[in-house]
Amino acid sequence: TKKKKKKKRQHLIYSGITGILAASTTPFYGGGMRLFPYARLFPNKLQLRIGRISPLTGFLRIPAIFEGSYRDKSEGDFGCLDFVGDDFEVEVSSTRYEEYLKRKKEQKESKKKARWWRQKKRSDYDASSDETSKSSPTGFPFQHSGESMGIKERFRVRVVKQPVRFISFLKPRIVVDD
């Protein structure tokens, strides 16, 4: 007999503006910062964190953010949304980011024109310096484990079914008998 695969249901969990969107299976981001306090609370799950705090709030709340106890208690606007699951698909888009890329491209072209004008005045203009720049990609800068992975519009994070063993010198928060 064949086992029927359970089809996962998809749900929209958030639509809106965010400053950071990060996921982890371990509580620590780096330097002892406990950015993912719910990671490792459930076996075979990861934490997805969506944050929209202002730089000033982030600065004022550094101790709470580092120890993993920061919770937003304001009505209406939120500071952080936390989700625990085993599979998340993320799609990002923003006209604000596309406008930013457009401004950067215009600044680059403006600098090229200024450089061209200076070169022309010196009469040593080189036609190869007048290359047209490639069209800007859409999406957002994406990092995996601190390494740039380019510009992404969509990505998926999920828990690997086969365990990967690492050495940890921290006390386990939950002991799971194998």
Image (tube, rainbow, N blue to C red):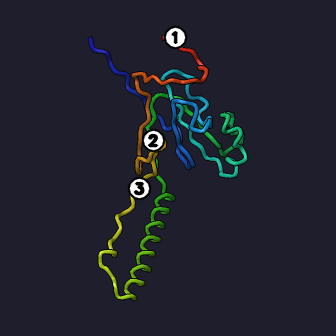
Task: Write the residue at 53% across / 14% down.
Answer: 176
Task: Write the residue at 37% across / 86% down.
Answer: 120
Q: Are marks 1 and 3 in contact (CB under 8 Å)?
A: no
Which of discs 2 and 3 lies nearer the camera? The answer is 2
Label 2 element class: strand
What's the residue type where badge 1 is placed? Asp
- State which tag comes first along the sequence, 1 or 2: 2
Q: Where is residue 170 drawn, in percent x and y?
A: 60, 24
Which of discs 1 and 3 lies nearer the camera? The answer is 1
- In the image, 28 versus 91, the foreground residue is 28
Tell me which corner region of the image, top left, top right, bottom left or bottom right, holds residue 156.
top left
- State which tag comes first along the sequence, 1 or 3: 3
Structural crowding at the residue carrying mark 1, measured as other residues with C-alpha within 10 Å and reported as few (<14), some (14–19) or many (≥20): few
Label 1 element class: loop
What's the residue type where badge 3 is placed? Thr
- State which tag comes first along the sequence, 2 or 3: 3
Q: Where is residue 143 drawn, in percent x and y?
A: 46, 45
In the rendered view, would you say 59 is above or below 30? Answer: below
Q: Where is residue 114 drawn, in percent x and y?
A: 44, 80
Residue position for label 3: 138
- In the image, 10 versus 144, the foreground residue is 144
Structural crowding at the residue carrying mark 3, measured as other residues with C-alpha within 10 Å and reported as few (<14), some (14–19) or many (≥20): some
Residue position for label 1: 177
- CA separation in Å, label 2 and label 3: 19 Å
Residue position for label 2: 144
Task: Write the residue at 44% across / 48% down.
Answer: 148
Q: Is residue 107 left or right of residue 31?
A: left
Q: Where is residue 23 drawn, in percent x and y?
A: 51, 36
